[in-house]
C-alpha cells in the first residue's frame, strides 16, 4: 500500500474515504467498503513510503479506468492540534496500514493537520484538496463527518459542494450493535472498563498491544512465572489496569501462544510505574529484543495488592488455570 503524508505524491485519480479512522472499527469498515463496488481491476500497489519518502519508483498515473481506493486521514489528530494535549491512539500507523490493506485500500494519505489546513473553508477544502490534489472521483464519509474551518461543514454540505464538480458523495449511516453506535469513543470506553470482549465486538477483532521485550526486574522468574516485559509506544491507548487472558504472536513462535498479561503498578512489590508483563503458558525461551503482538481476549481480574509474595504466587497460578479455559474461536 502506498502511504504518504505529502499531498504532492499521491496516486491519482482516487475514490476517497474521509475520516480519522482511529481503531479501524466496524463502523469505519462500512465507510471504506462503500467504495468497494468501484474497486476497479488493476494490481494493488505493493510499495510503502514512510512520511512521504519514496522507497522505489512508481507511476502516479492509474491504469485507464482505475481509481485508487484511498483513505484520507489527518496527522496529528485534530484533537491533538487544537487542544495541545496528547491523544493515545487505538491504532498506531503500522497497525492502521495493515488493517486498511485487508480492506483493499491501495493508498493512505495522511494530511498534515496544521493551521493552514484548519483555516480552509469547506468549499476550499473540497476544491484544493479533494478536486485539485486528489482528483477524487467518488467520496465516502460517515454520517457525522465534519470538515473545514471550525468544523463548519457537514456530510450533507460535502455532498452539495462536491456535486458542483460532479463528484458523488456516499454518506454512510451509523453502524449499530446492540443498540449502541459503533465508534472510537465506544471502543475506548470499553477498554477503559477492561471490557475487551465488548471492544472486540465493536472492532471486529481483538484489541492488540505490540511491543519489544525489554529487561525487567525478573520478579516473575523468582515466583516461577517468568514474564516478558513489553515496551509499548507511549502513543498507544492502554486498557484498564488488571490481568488479562491473551494470545501472543511473535516470530519466535511456531504458532500463536496463550498467555496471561498484567497491566499495572505491581503494588505487592511497591511498584512505582506502570508495566506490561506477559507470562506465556507452555513456552520458554529468550525473547529479549523480540517484538510481540498481544491480542486481549478476556479480562480476568483487576489489579490488587497481596499480603505476601506467596499469596501473589497462588493468585497467578489461579490466573493461569482460568486462562487455560479459554478456547480460541473457530475462524
Image (spheres, rainbow, N blue to C red):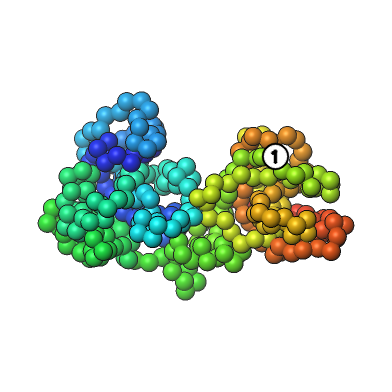
Horizontal side, residue 320 vs residue 68: left or right: right
Q: How many numbered discs sit on the rendered protein?
A: 1
Quadrant of the snapshot with the N terminus: top left
Looking at the picture, does residue 120 appear above or below residue 179? above
Q: Position of residue 20 (x, y in %)?
A: 37, 55
Give the farthest residue toward the right.
310
Residue in view at x 33 percent, y 41 percent: 5
Residue 105 lies, with reference to residue 171, above or below; the image says above
Image coordinates for residue 269, horizontal then vertical, percent? 78, 56
Q: Quadrant of residue 143?
A: bottom left
Write the residue at 30% across / 58% down.
141
* Residue where numbered disc 1 is placed: 215
> Quick one: which residue is furthest to the left in this view?
164
Between 141 and 41, the residue placed more toward the observer is 141
Residue 258 as seen in the image, left or right of residue 57: right
Instruction: State the residue in front, 54 or 295.
Output: 54
Q: Position of residue 331 (x, y in %)?
A: 58, 50
Report if residue 162 is visible in the image: no
Q: Residue at x 65, y 40 (%)?
A: 213
- Mark 1 secondary-structure assignment: loop
Quick one: which residue is furthest to the top in this view?
56
Residue 235 in view, yes or no: yes
Q: Quadrant of residue 120?
A: bottom left
- Residue 165, position as x, y percentages in the image: 13, 53
Packing grade of label 1 (10 A; few <14, some 14-19, many >=20) is few
Q: Residue at x 69, y 55 (%)?
A: 272
Question: Left or right: 251 with respect to 182?
Answer: right
Amino acid at each position: 500500500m502506498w502511504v504518504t503524508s505529502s499531498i504532492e505524491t499521491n496516486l491519482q485519480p482516487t475514490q476517497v474515504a474521509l475520516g480519522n479512522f482511529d481503531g479501524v472499527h466496524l463502523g469505519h469498515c462500512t465507510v471504506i467498503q462503500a467504495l468497494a463496488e468501484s474497486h476497479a481491476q488493476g494490481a494493488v500497489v505493493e510499495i510503502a513510503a514512510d512520511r512521504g519518502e519514496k522507497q522505489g519508483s512508481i507511476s502516479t498515473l492509474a491504469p485507464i479506468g482505475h481509481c485508487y481506493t484511498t483513505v484520507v486521514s489527518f496527522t496529528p489528530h485534530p484533537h491533538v492540534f487544537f487542544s495541545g494535549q496528547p491523544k493515545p491512539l487505538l491504532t498506531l500507523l503500522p497497525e492502521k496500514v495493515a488493517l486498511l490493506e485487508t480492506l483493499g485500500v491501495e493508498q493512505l494519505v495522511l494530511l498534515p493537520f496544521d493551521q493552514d489546513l484548519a483555516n480552509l473553508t469547506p468549499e476550499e477544502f473540497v476544491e484544493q484538496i479533494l478536486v485539485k490534489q486528489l482528483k477524487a472521483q467518488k467520496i465516502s464519509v460517515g454520517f457525522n463527518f465534519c470538515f473545514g474551518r471550525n468544523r463548519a461543514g457537514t456530510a450533507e454540505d460535502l455532498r452539495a459542494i462536491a456535486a458542483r464538480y460532479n463528484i458523488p458523495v456516499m454518506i454512510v449511516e451509523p453502524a449499530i450493535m446492540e443498540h449502541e453506535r459503533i465508534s472510537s469513543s465506544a471502543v475506548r470506553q470499553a477498554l477503559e472498563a477492561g471490557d475487551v470482549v465488548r471492544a472486540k465486538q465493536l472492532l471486529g477483532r481483538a484489541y492488540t498491544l505490540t511491543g519489544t521485550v525489554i529487561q525487567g526486574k525478573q520478579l516473575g522468574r523468582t515466583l516461577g512465572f517468568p514474564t516478558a516485559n513489553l515496551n509499548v509506544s507511549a502513543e498507544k491507548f492502554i486498557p484498564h489496569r488488571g490481568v488479562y487472558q491473551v494470545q501472543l504472536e511473535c516470530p519466535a513462535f511456531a504458532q500463536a501462544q496463550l498467555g496471561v498479561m498484567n497491566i499495572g503498578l505491581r503494588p505487592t512489590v511497591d511498584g512505582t510505574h506502570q508495566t506490561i508483563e506477559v507470562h506465556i503458558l507452555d513456552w520458554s525461551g529468550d525473547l529479549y529484543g523480540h517484538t510481540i503482538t498481544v491480542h486481549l481476549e478476556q479480562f480476568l481480574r483487576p489489579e490488587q495488592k497481596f499480603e505476601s509474595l506467596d499469596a501473589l504466587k497462588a493468585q497467578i497460578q489461579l490466573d493461569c488455570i482460568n486462562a487455560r479455559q479459554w478456547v480460541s474461536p473457530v475462524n
